Image (cartoon, helix red, strand yellow):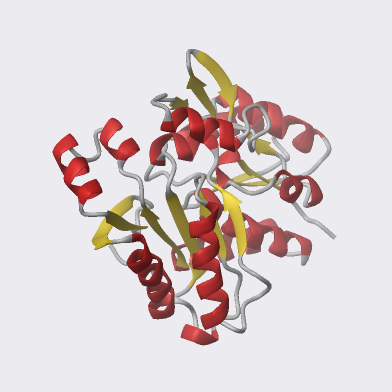
Amino acid sequence: MKLFSLTCCSTADMPPEFFSSNDIPFASFHFVMDGKEYPDDLGQSMPFDVFYKKIADGATPTTSQVNTEDYEKMWDPLLKSGSDVLHITLSSGISGTINSAKVAREAMVSKYPDRKIVIVDSLGASSGYGLLVTEACRLRDEGKTLEEAQKWLENNKLRLHHWFFSTDLSSYVRGGRISKASGMFGTLLKICPLLNMNTLGELIPREKIRTKKKVISEIVERMAQHAENGLNYSGKCYISNSACYEDARAVADLVEARFPHLDGKVLINSVGTVIGAHTGPGTVALFFFGDMRVK
């Protein structure tokens, strides 16, 4: 018996069938491309290949978070039906959407005083956020109470590792995260930055690695260092990529070879349009449960 409803945002970067088959409504972020606004709706309004091709050709999309009205519209039918709600947000370290969710919660609880809305800050992004939603779905389906699920998520979300690398520095230069000179020299030297998320859910550069081959090997080595039970890791592993499936597949192949006890094959998803507006093409991200993150 399901004792609560589960919701999240589009930036969990999971396939449409994940949300539909698991009965998880999501609220869409938005992006503007070439002067037109689109919902971040899992590649339905603008296919991912078209989106990343436009960025590669020089387009500079901008993004906006979920507003309070969107949250209220998503939650109203659930509360009206008599269900409490557990909502998981994109990391507060990279987005202010949790604040909109909290404002919407106050309005909804005033309208439905007998119902509860619990908000959990994922401190994650993309399919790492999606992996936390997957675990919340498991807890819901096992019949856990709203409070039990909330407690598990809060106690375990910082064990969810997010490791990223990028082979294309163009969007980092356009977004002002690195200088033009650094971008030029990085490209010439085939530098692939390796990043992860810290305890505040912020994306932090950790190392500059030369060549794609080396960074693919290194990101899997980081999993070996941090995964729960090391090479005997038996949890799920997700990867997301922005228009570089072959690189993601190379990482997945190494993971599956080194971690024979995984819970299923590595799931490869696309980085969605809102997260992808900031990373650009050429980013691969690896997600798994392990030791507690560090600053």
Q: Residue furthest left?
A: 181
Identify the residue at horizontal 54%, vertical 87% (top origin): 232
Q: Is residue 103 above or below residue 216?
A: above
Residue 110 seen from this side: no
Q: Position of residue 187 (x, y in %)?
A: 25, 47
Identify the residue at horizontal 63%, vertical 35% (top origin): 43
Identify the residue at horizontal 52%, vertical 74% (top origin): 255
Q: Position of residue 163 (x, y in %)?
A: 40, 61
Q: Position of residue 135 (x, y in %)?
A: 64, 62
Between residue 162 and residue 45, name the one nearer to us: 45
Between residue 294 and residue 280, name the one nearer to us: 280
Quarter of the picture holding the C terminus: bottom left
Residue 26 seen from this side: yes
Q: For the image shown, how many numbered marks are present on the structure?
A: 0
Quarter of the picture holding the N terminus: bottom right
Asked whether, in this view, residue 251 is left or right of residue 72, the answer is: left
Identify the residue at horizontal 60%, vertical 58% (top origin): 268
Q: Is residue 128 above or below residue 229?
A: above
